[in-house]
Amino acid sequence: MDQKIAWPAKSREFRNHHFDSTVWNDFRFRDDDIVIATYAKSGTTWMQQIVAQLVFDGDPDIDVAQRSPWLDLRYPSKGLKLLTLEAQTHRRFIKTHLPIDALVFSPKAKYLYIGRDGRDVVWSMYNHHANATQQWYDNLNKTPGLVGPPIERPTADIHQYWHEWMAGDGHPWWPFWENVRGWWAARHLPNVMFVHFVDLKRDMAGEIRRIADFLDIPVDGPQWETILHHCSFDWMKQNAARHVGGGGDWLAGGAETFINKGVNGRWADTLTAGDVAEYEARARAELGEDCARWLKEGGAIG
């Protein structure tokens, strides 16, 4: 690749109840690594399944949660995750929710960034947060090395939850706008591809072909229809335990609660016209017109 390209550089560490970005400092890249990056609740698990199916040629028995760890999550320990990834002999695909300036960026890896409207993100986040068990809270809050306040149980009022998320820029999780904005700035790099949740819903087969081309994985064989079937929402819901760490036992209702509805627009019955206007104005101010449009609608990248 062109050595004159200004590659993203790590400029800070990011730590909270979920994150320990220092793990990237010790991660040893391979030239064909794939990094799946999102803010969270934007289609991460779906993209992990798509990549797994492409890498493993439609194998239905792949335990995606084990094969594709969330590298910067505080548990299990970073040492264990690094050893696990070092031992993998297949093409690796790694999950991150970090902003781009808090991880180490490799010019030779491939990066898939998945976007989703912030309103849909919050509604999916709430399902995750409200259904978490005490084990989930203990894993986050009692694992040594916590920086900052612990994460607490959410309000029962999702409208209040929305206002807290907006006022606190992603509260109680992590900042939303900087995550999208930072990755957006890297969208034209030759090893970065943007995918939108809406486009995956609209044309899954077309988007998977586009992803396969980006990853240099041929999809013209007899397994193509099998790959598509295994990436469908219904199949993933029926096989949810393969896609959620610990089999989903840290969620009330198990892994099927994690793979919840896979739909957009649930916020429309709760947010007022004023709420919607405030969010859309904030998106334009934080991201600019082109990025705000893409985040809302998907489609072509500006």
Image: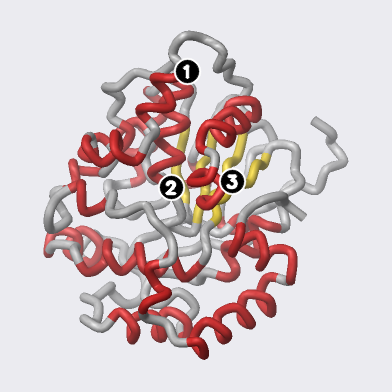
Question: Residue 241 appears in which quarter of the rendering?
Answer: top left
The quadrant of the rendering that contains the N terminus is top right
Alpha-carbon neighbours of circle 1 within 10 Å: few (<14), some, or many (≥20)? some
Note whether 94 is above or below 286 in the view shown: above
| Tags 2 and 1 touching, CB below 8 Å | no
In the image, what residue occupies the spot 64% across and 38% down? 106
Residue 104: percent from left, percent from top: 59, 47
Colouring scheme applied when the structure was drawn: secondary structure
Amino acid of disc 3? Val
* Residue at numbered disc 1: 224
Q: How far across and down, in percent of the image, does residue 255 sit?
A: 20, 47
Name the secondary structure under disc 1.
helix
Q: Identify the amino acid type marked 1.
A: Trp
Q: Is residue 33 visible?
A: yes
Q: Residue at x 43, y 57 (%)?
A: 40
Residue 40 vertical position relative to residue 94 in the rendered view, above or below: below
Image-based side of 67 in relation to 26, left or right: left
Three-letter residue code for mark 2: Thr
Residue at image mark 2: 44
Residue farthest top in this picture: 222
Q: Quadrant of residue 185?
A: bottom right
Q: Earlier in the sequence, mark 3 or mark 2?
A: 2
The residue labelled by disc 3 is 195
For the residues carrying marks 3 and 2, which lies nearer the camera in this image?
A: 3
Which badge, 3 or 1, is on the more N-terminal residue? 3
